Image (cartoon, rainbow, N blue to C red):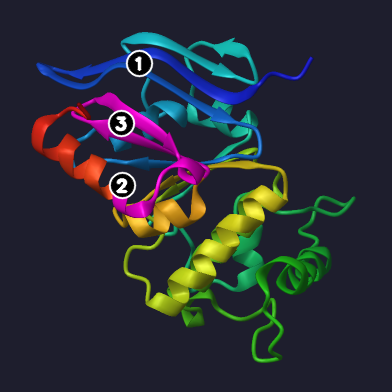
Amino acid sequence: MEAEYRMELRNVSKHFGEVQSLRNVDFRLGRNEVVGLVGDNGAGKSTMIKIMTGYYNPDEGELYFNGVKVDNLTVPKARSLGVETVYQERALAELQTLWRNIFLGREVNNRFGFLDVKKMREETYRLMNESMGFTSTAVTPDTPIMTFSGGEKQGVAIVRALYFDADIIILDEPTMGLSLGETRKLLEFVRTIKRAGKSAIFIDHNIFHVHSIADRVVVLDRGRIAGEFLTKDISLDALMEKMYRVAETGSLD
């Protein structure tokens, strides 16, 4: 029987010397779900993401992927489990072409062991039309990434993750530095994650963006889960008010 959640953190804690970055965190990500993860700087969001992606192991607690407990998670193991991260820095090779960025580190070889450039260009052209929305003849698989807008670069990173069958895509401050138009395009790319039947964790300081794209919002405060809300059941204003209360008092009460 298929597990209810793609990923779970159960009672996870993490210390760095005397600093407790996470304390008894319970977090879950459902199938075909976008979860917004919000909180002030220092709330523990980055530590959570690094535990989910195998950069850190928790000091206490357990991780589950598709209902199966995973011990000693590493970055390669997380990727093999379908976890991909799209960072605000975008992690793209600016001077390389679009097709090279799509297949960066995962190049396709022909039966002789050489790079199958023709196939990679053809696949990139298909993705341009079907997933990226690049219909202008000015953009080709050989267009350098440095000529793309910020939103287009984020879209390339998302499409790359989907192409390589990521089940969980973590977006770390993806709208930072983007214009209004680029942000709108980026949010539409995030919607393609759900349409593909995948799941995402969306981290952003702009609560308007989070509320507009997430199915559920989890509020992290000083290393603990302060609350979580279904966006269909709470207005943007009410969610902002609760976040102000958490920031001021550390509690929703």
User: Of 64 and 72, which appears nearest the observer?
Assistant: 64
Q: 90 above or below 73?
A: below
Magenta run includes residue 230: yes
Image location of residue 218, percent across then percent down: 38, 35
The answer to whether mark 2 and mark 1 are in CB contact below 8 A is no
Q: Bounds of the magenta span?
A: 215-237
In the rendered image, which residue does mark 1 sit on? 58
Quadrant in which the N terminus appears: top right
In the rendered image, which residue does mark 3 sit on? 47
Nearer mark to the viewer, of 2 and 1: 2
Rendered residue at 16%/38% (across/down): 245
Badge 2 density bin: few <14, some 14–19, many ≥20, Cα 10 Å: few
Q: Dot 2 lies on which element? A: helix
Quadrant in which the C terminus appears: top left
Image location of residue 26, percent across then percent down: 40, 18
The tally of labels here is 3
Rendered residue at 32%/69% (across/down): 177
In the rendered image, which residue does mark 2 sit on? 238
Whole-angstrom CA distance, mark 2 to mark 1, is 33 Å
**Amino acid type shown at disc 2:** Ala
Image location of residue 234, percent across then percent down: 41, 44
Sequence-wise, the earlier of marks 1 and 3 is 3
Sequence-wise, the earlier of marks 2 and 1 is 1
Q: Dot 3 lies on which element? A: helix
User: Of 191 and 251, which appears nearest the observer?
Assistant: 251
Image location of residue 197, percent across then percent down: 72, 43
Q: Answer with left or right where residue 45 lies relative to residue 69.
A: left
Magenta run includes residue 59: no
Query: Looking at the rendering, which quadrant does residue 159 occupy?
Result: bottom right
User: Of 37 and 236, which appears nearest the observer?
Assistant: 236
